[in-house]
Image (spheres, grey):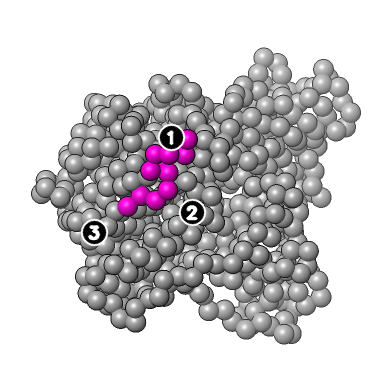
């Protein structure tokens, strides 16, 4: 599911104006040449950058560890792990590290593959026979551990209901039952689509294959052999004294427990996580020489797996590890993974060729871009210090000149409506320029001579804003293309191409769904997930599901999801990528029709056509229903 941030406009204005009007502190002078093996300037510059970004983004604490092969050459904490107690952050401070947990899950699965207990290319059902999910795609492959680890399984992203819980005993093994009545979002190996649900299934499979709990097996084959002493999936007494508090602004938050531990439930510190990088650099050996994974296993995990996936463009991923260059030059491969939970962010990046790596952790809801920027800067300068290869600290893309007289063809091929991760976007022609409306804001799309477009946004039509939604607009181009028969917009950002949105063609909305336009109320919510403003609307010929979602530590967010009915009782979320392609269903619960999505049921409280709720009729015989098979049961 993709949710669009919609802070109140006054808050947006104050934040943006602060960004425009605030000056930047002066960076330390950079030596013209680097002394081989001397990381002093790396430490000086990264310390300055960290403190600046902490101040800019209101982040209480950041911890960092820089690794050269089997040694930590620098580790430090900045700020306060707990503001009230004035506890300073150190390299030993323990944070929630979110999705970095996936690297441990994937590594544990590969350990079982080494032992012959899991075949990563066989259907998941071979090791997890309980797995079953509906499938409307014909002649497609199976969900396997391999395509789970590369996020090409085609499974839904999340099951929101129960994802966060106050009960630490809530088990991710429930996910397999929650999926039985759900649908695949895509055929396996069709497109990169990040899935936490899939990693929970892999964790369940690890339990089945190992005969142990997931947590115990990961501890046995990864955490302890690597020498990690402050890493685990629950708040162990041994590291609780070192545990950082999370912050949303100045407010300390108490997040619930994550059900999907294999996807994001890990606690650790920079010192421990640096050992994972050292293991990769040593081809599977721990710092004390223990063979944790076979050398060929490590090499397979950092090898590109998605070579023949057209919709992935030049995005590379291994087994768990992302292989995105991050703007770092002078190396053959960059491996990385990030993580984010309320309110913690993490980043781990490595350069296997040069045996350099960095871990950065923070304890703030606003720390996402900071851990990434600090990590990349640290590795660029460390690589320069180790090899002498001069690195650009700021990566800028080269754009073609502005097209002074763009052709009608160039402009018209972009005009339309698009399902994007920012919601439904309208692109319209304005003479020889294009206008895009995103979340109530107007943007200019400026045509370039190579057929691509730049994005320009001016607050009040006067103040140029270069950073929005965490994106540096100066380093972005958009390109409308057709791939695999689908009209999409490709965004080039941070040195790689990715799908920004897919064109939505308005179709006649079936009468069965027009009769359902109206207001709904989500059932079974708790303090971890509170919905409001739930509506099903007709947006100029496109059926749209709207809602607002409030979680305890985050600003209220708004979703506007275009959907296409495929039967009287089912519709698919339009677009390509994470959270899209998933199914919304109308089901009969005790004689009442409810709208079901991501584990939640919503009941109608009013219809736009004025029909009384008591006159509602559930459609028992959908006349548009396509043929359906199942993933899992026949394999």
> In the current view of this chain or complex, which residue is farthest to the right?
610
Q: Is residue 516 shown left or right of residue 387?
A: right
Asked if residue 79 lies in the magenta stretch, the reply is: yes
Labelled pair 2, 1 in contact (Cβ < 8 Å)? no
State the SS at label 3: strand
Q: Position of residue 316 (x, y in %)?
A: 40, 61
Q: Residues within 10 Å of mark 3 (few under 14, many from 20)?
A: some
Q: Nearer the viewer, residue 134 or 516?
A: 516
Residue at the (68%, 76%) spot, across then down? 447
Q: Which residue is mark 3?
A: 73
Region rendered in magenta: 76-88
Q: Position of residue 146 (x, y in %)?
A: 34, 47
Q: Which residue is mark 1?
A: 85
Label number found at residue 379: none
Question: From what the image shows, is residue 137 above or below residue 66?
Answer: above
Q: Nearer the viewer, residue 364 or 400?
A: 364
């Amino acid at each position: 599911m993709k949710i669009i941030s919609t802070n109140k406009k006054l808050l947006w204005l104050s934040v943006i104006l602060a960004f425009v009007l605030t000056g930047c502190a002066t960076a330390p002078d950079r030596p013209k040449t680097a002394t081989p093996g001397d990381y002093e300037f790396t430490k000086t510059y990264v310390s300055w950058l960290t403190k600046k970004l902490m101040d800019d983004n209101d982040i209480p604490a950041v911890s960092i560890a820089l690794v050269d092969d089997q040694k930590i050459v620098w580790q430090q904490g900045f700020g306060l792990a707990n503001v009230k107690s004035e506890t300073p952050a150190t390299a030993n401070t323990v944070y929630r590290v979110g999705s970095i947990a996936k690297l441990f899950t994937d590594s544990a699965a590969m350990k079982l593959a080494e032992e012959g207990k899991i075949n990563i290319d066989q259907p998941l059902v071979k090791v997890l026979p309980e797995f079953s999910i509906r499938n409307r795609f014909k002649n497609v492959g199976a969900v396997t551990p391999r395509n789970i680890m590369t996020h090409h399984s085609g499974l839904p992203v999340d099951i929101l209901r129960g994802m966060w819980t106050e009960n630490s005993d809530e088990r991710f093994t429930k996910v397999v039952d929650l999926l039985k009545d759900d649908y695949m979002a895509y055929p396996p190996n069709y497109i990169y689509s990040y899935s936490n649900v899939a990693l929970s299934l892999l964790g369940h499979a690890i339990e089945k294959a190992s005969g142990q709990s997931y947590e115990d097996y990961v501890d046995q084959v990864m955490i302890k052999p690597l020498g990690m002493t402050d890493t685990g999936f629950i708040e162990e007494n041994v590291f609780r004294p070192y545990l950082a508090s999370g912050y949303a602004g100045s407010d300390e938050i108490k997040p619930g427990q994550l059900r999907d531990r294999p996807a994001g439930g890990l606690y650790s510190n920079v010192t421990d996580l640096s050992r994972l990088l050292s293991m990769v650099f040593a081809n599977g050996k721990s710092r004390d020489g223990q063979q944790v994974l076979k050398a060929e296993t490590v090499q397979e995990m950092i090898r590109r797996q998605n070579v023949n996936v057209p919709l992935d463009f030049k995005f590379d991923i291994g087994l768990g590890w992302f292989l995105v260059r991050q703007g770092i030059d002078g190396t053959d491969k960059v491996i990385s993974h990030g993580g984010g939970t309320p309110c913690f962010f993490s980043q781990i990046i490595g350069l296997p060729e040069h045996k350099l790596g960095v871990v950065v952790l923070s304890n703030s809801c606003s720390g996402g871009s900071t851990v990434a920027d600090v990590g990349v800067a640290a590795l660029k300068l460390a690589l320069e210090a180790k090899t002498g290869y001069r690195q650009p600290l700021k990566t800028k893309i080269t754009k073609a000149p502005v097209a002074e007289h763009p052709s009608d063809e160039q402009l018209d091929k972009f005009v339309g409506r698009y399902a994007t991760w920012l919601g439904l976007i309208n692109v319209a022609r304005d003479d020889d320029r294009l206008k895009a409306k995103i979340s109530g804001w107007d943007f200019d799309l400026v045509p370039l001579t190579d057929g691509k477009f730049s994005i320009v946004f001016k607050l009040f039509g006067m103040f140029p804003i270069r950073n929005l939604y965490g994106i540096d607009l100066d380093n972005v181009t958009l390109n409308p293309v057709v791939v695999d028969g689908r009209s999409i917009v490709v965004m080039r950002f941070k040195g790689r191409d990715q799908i920004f949105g897919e064109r939505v063609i308005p179709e006649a909305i079936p009468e069965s769904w027009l009769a359902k336009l109206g207001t709904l109320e989500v059932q079974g919510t708790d303090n971890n997930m509170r919905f409001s403003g739930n509506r099903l609307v007709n947006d100029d010929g496109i059926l749209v599901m709207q809602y607002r979602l409030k979680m305890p530590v985050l600003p209220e967010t708004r979703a506007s999801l275009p959907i296409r009915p495929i039967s009287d009782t089912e519709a698919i979320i339009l677009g390509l990528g994470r959270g899209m392609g998933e199914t919304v269903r109308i089901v009969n619960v005790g004689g009442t029709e409810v709208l079901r999505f991501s584990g939640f049921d919503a009941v109608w409280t009013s219809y736009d056509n004025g029909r009384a709720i008591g006159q509602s009729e559930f459609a028992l015989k959908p006349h548009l229903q396509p043929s359906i098979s199942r993933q899992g049961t026949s394999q």
